[in-house]
């Protein structure tokens, strides 16, 4: 995998999805190097490096306009690379037309051929490859069965539901046995329950085809989390982070990444310097840094990209907070396992959300959003509250 | 309930009352002349009714010749319109040349022109008093315009937009993602054209083609100006029989044949449109 991104401290190894061992010894199915793309005078992709290995699901994640779809379309050959190279299956296909690239493409609106039956749709790529009729029919049967659409081969696309059309589109793309499968927002046109079902379906499909490389574009972080071996986060045409979903969630390398995943509080803090700064490196090798917000001192986990002095942002998820035990029992910092950060503030509002309740807590310099378990008895708005959270759940990030 | 039904009946009667004047007006201006024409066509020389007029025109060489001339001109013009129309529509949609939008607008505006205007415009350019003719006259050139090809050129000029317009609509509604899917599946551009684009154009092409055929069969103005001596089509035959020979039963019989031909083509056109709209 690329070196861009984050370093996971050794203590985290249980929660970081293990990279597939030996993967890096096999050549990548897709290798994009220094890719730049412009639409007219507007630069939409800048210096993109990306490798996708056999058996790996890489999710390109970003908001609309981040360049994620353009990157996929550049790999597919529909967008011309202005600079850099695209190597597919060991061959440099930077300038090759789409039909010579041998990639399976599935798009949001399925793009099934309306005048062809399901089986003709699936057979299309094989016929274009001049496969024998027997081979073609065998492959059509195999891949329609694989996506559970074997009973529908005589139907026309307009006679199928959205989810069924998407399965046929998958079978059609898989039937050519592509080097890699490119999925461009494949689930965005489906409603929520069907989307959850299709996510499971895609996971099962990948288990049955363990060797295929997948590039999946989405703007939906939960979809990315559920499907990705590796998430590549794009913003304004650049890769801002990449890593396993777990790593990006727990140790975001920058504020933009933190904001993209889950409900992160990004609190403005000052890093404490000099004599005030105790050297904290625990047995596992994680590094810690004391920081200060609103006169309260906290301990933050640091990564290689964390700043070492001055102003910084402390990333704490809303779900990290717990109601603090009575004062004096926490926050002594003497023991690595038990030490907890405590923040005191004034409750501004409490919203009951069913399984949790959301509190807005005013610190003076900043407002924290905290989600506490539903059964916790919390102070009323206007009263003071003490919240505690583990230093492992607080990552020090550079200001933007 | 009964009251409601009564009211409905009242409403129906009221609606019929509203319909009566337009139906009467239509009857007067359309149905009566048509009925008169049918009556003339089936009148016998002895004052009774019979098929004498039809027998006469079917025996005359003029009718068969004009039927053949009509078919020859309209099929040739339609075939050229279809080929030209497909090429133009594909070029406007997929190979946007400078001014493609203007061409598309001109095609829209063209549909509003009267057809004989094209014929007159062509005679100004290529006709016996046109500037091209005077250039060619010195070289012994004879105007090719007044005759079969003159009529075909004028009809192609005028009716090609009738084919292009529905084709452009069909191409506009064609999902580009389908073309991309096809090419990523390994289809070369020519294969994408043949297996995805052309099938998507088919209903519109069929509709546009039948409309074109229908209109060229019944074309009158262009032929009157450009082909009168060489191309006696059905409308020209009717015109000649009625206006020059005062043979009203003969003219009416030919007219009935013309109407039957047009109606059957119109039915084909409607069924193509229904397929298109489905």
Image: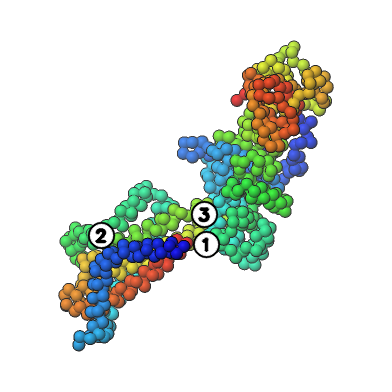
Please determine whether, in this image, residue B187 is positioned above or below residue B263: above
Asked if residue A188 shows in the view, the reply is yes
Check disc 3 and report its element: helix, strand or loop. Answer: helix
Whichever of labels 3 and 2 marks the residue nearer the N terminus, that label is 2
Residue A223 to residue A390: above or below: below
Whether callout 1 and callout 3 share a subunit is answered no
Colour option used: rainbow
**Residue appearing at x 78%, y 23% in the figure:** A325
- The residue wearing badge 1 is A115
Residue A353: % across, % down: 67, 35
Q: Report x, y in % for residue A368.
A: 66, 25
Q: How far apart are the two marked residues, 1 and 3, measured between alpha carbons?
A: 13 Å
Q: Are marks 2 and 1 on the same chain?
A: no
* Residue denoted by label 3: B179
Q: Residues within 10 Å of mark 2 (few under 14, many from 20)?
A: few
Q: Chain of mark 2?
A: B
Say if labels 3 and 2 share a chain.
yes
Q: What residue does disc 2 label?
A: B114
Instruction: Please identify the quarter of the rendering in which residue A229 is found.
Output: top right
Q: Quadrant of the N terminus of chain A?
A: top right
The quarter of the picture where residue A45 lies is top right
Task: Report crowding for label 1: few under 14, some 14 to 19, many 20 or more residues within 10 A (C-alpha).
Answer: some
- Real-space Cα distance between discs 2 and 1? 37 Å
Q: How many C-alpha atoms fall within 10 Å of the one at disc 3: few (<14), some, or many (≥20)? A: many
Residue A124: mark = none
In the rendered view, does B73 fall on the left or right side of A228? left
Q: Nearer the viewer, mark 1 or mark 3?
A: 1
């Amino acid at each position: 995998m690329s070196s861009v991104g984050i370093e996971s401290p050794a203590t985290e190894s249980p929660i970081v999805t293990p990279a597939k061992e030996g993967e890096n010894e096999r050549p990548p199915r897709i290798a994009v190097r220094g890719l730049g793309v412009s639409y007219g005078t507007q630069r939409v992709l800048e210096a993109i490096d990306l490798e996708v290995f056999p058996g790996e699901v890489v999710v390109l994640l970003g908001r609309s306009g981040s360049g994620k779809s353009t990157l996929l379309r550049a790999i597919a050959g529909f967008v011309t690379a202005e600079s850099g190279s695209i190597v597919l299956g060991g061959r440099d296909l930077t300038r090759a037309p789409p039909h010579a690239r041998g990639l399976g493409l599935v798009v949001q609106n399925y793009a099934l051929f309306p005048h062809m039956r399901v089986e003709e749709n699936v057979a299309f790529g094989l016929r274009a490859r001049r496969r024998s009729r027997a081979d073609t029919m065998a492959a059509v049967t195999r891949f329609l069965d694989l996506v559970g659409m074997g009973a529908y081969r005589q139907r026309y696309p307009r006679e199928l539901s959205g989810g069924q059309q998407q399965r046929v589109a998958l079978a059609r793309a898989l039937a050519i046995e592509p080097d890699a499968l490119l999925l461009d927002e494949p689930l965005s046109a489906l409603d929520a329950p069907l989307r959850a079902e299709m996510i499971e379906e895609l996971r099962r499909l990948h288990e049955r085809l363990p060797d295929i490389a997948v590039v999946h574009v989405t703007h939906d972080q939960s979809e990315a989390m559920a499907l990705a071996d590796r998430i590549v986060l794009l913003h304004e045409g650049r890769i801002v982070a990449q890593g396993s979903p777990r790593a990006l969630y727990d140790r975001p390398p920058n504020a933009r990444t933190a904001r993209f995943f889950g409900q992160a509080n990004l609190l403005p803090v000052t890093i404490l310097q000099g004599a005030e700064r105790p050297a904290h490196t625990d047995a596992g090798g994680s590094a810690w840094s004391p920081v200060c917000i609103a006169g309260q001192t906290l301990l933050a986990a640091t990564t290689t990209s964390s700043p070492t002095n001055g102003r910084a942002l402390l990333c704490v998820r809303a779900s990290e907070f717990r109601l603090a035990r009575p004062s004096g029992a926490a926050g002594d910092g003497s023991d690595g396992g038990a030490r907890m950060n405590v923040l005191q503030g004034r409750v501004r509002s409490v919203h009951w959300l069913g399984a949790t309740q959301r509190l807005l807590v005013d610190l003076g310099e900043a407002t924290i959003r905290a989600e506490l378990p539903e059964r916790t008895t919390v102070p009323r708005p206007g009263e003071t509250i003490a919240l505690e959270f583990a230093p492992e759940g607080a990552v020090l990030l550079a200001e933007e | 309930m009964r009251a409601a039904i009564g009211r409905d009946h009242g409403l129906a009667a009221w609606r019929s009352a509203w319909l009566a004047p337009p139906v009467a007006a239509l009857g007067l201006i359309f149905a009566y002349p048509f009925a008169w024409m049918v009556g003339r066509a089936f009148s016998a020389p002895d004052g009774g009714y019979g098929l004498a007029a039809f027998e006469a025109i079917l025996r005359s060489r003029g009718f068969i010749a004009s039927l053949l001339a009509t078919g020859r001109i309209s099929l040739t013009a339609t075939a050229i319109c279809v080929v030209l129309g497909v090429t133009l529509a594909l070029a406007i949609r997929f190979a946007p040349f400078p001014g493609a939008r203007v061409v598309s607008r001109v095609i829209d505006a063209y549909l509003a022109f009267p057809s004989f205007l094209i014929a007159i415009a062509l005679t100004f350019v290529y006709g016996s008093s046109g500037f091209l003719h005077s250039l060619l006259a010195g070289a012994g050139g004879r105007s090719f315009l007044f005759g079969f090809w003159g009529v075909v050129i004028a009809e192609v000029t005028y009716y090609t937009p009738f084919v292009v317009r529905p084709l452009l609509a069909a191409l506009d509604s064609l999902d580009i993602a389908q073309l991309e899917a096809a090419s990523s599946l390994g289809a070369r551009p020519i294969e994408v054209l043949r297996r995805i684009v052309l099938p998507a154009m088919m209903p519109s092409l069929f509709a546009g083609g039948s409309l074109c055929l229908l209109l060229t069969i019944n074309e009158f103005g262009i032929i009157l100006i450009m082909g009168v001596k060489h191309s006696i089509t059905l409308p020209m035959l009717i015109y000649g029989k009625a206006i020059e020979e005062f043979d009203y039963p003969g003219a009416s019989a030919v007219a009935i044949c013309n109407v039957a031909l047009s109606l059957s083509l119109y039915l084909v056109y409607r069924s193509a449109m229904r397929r298109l709209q489905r």
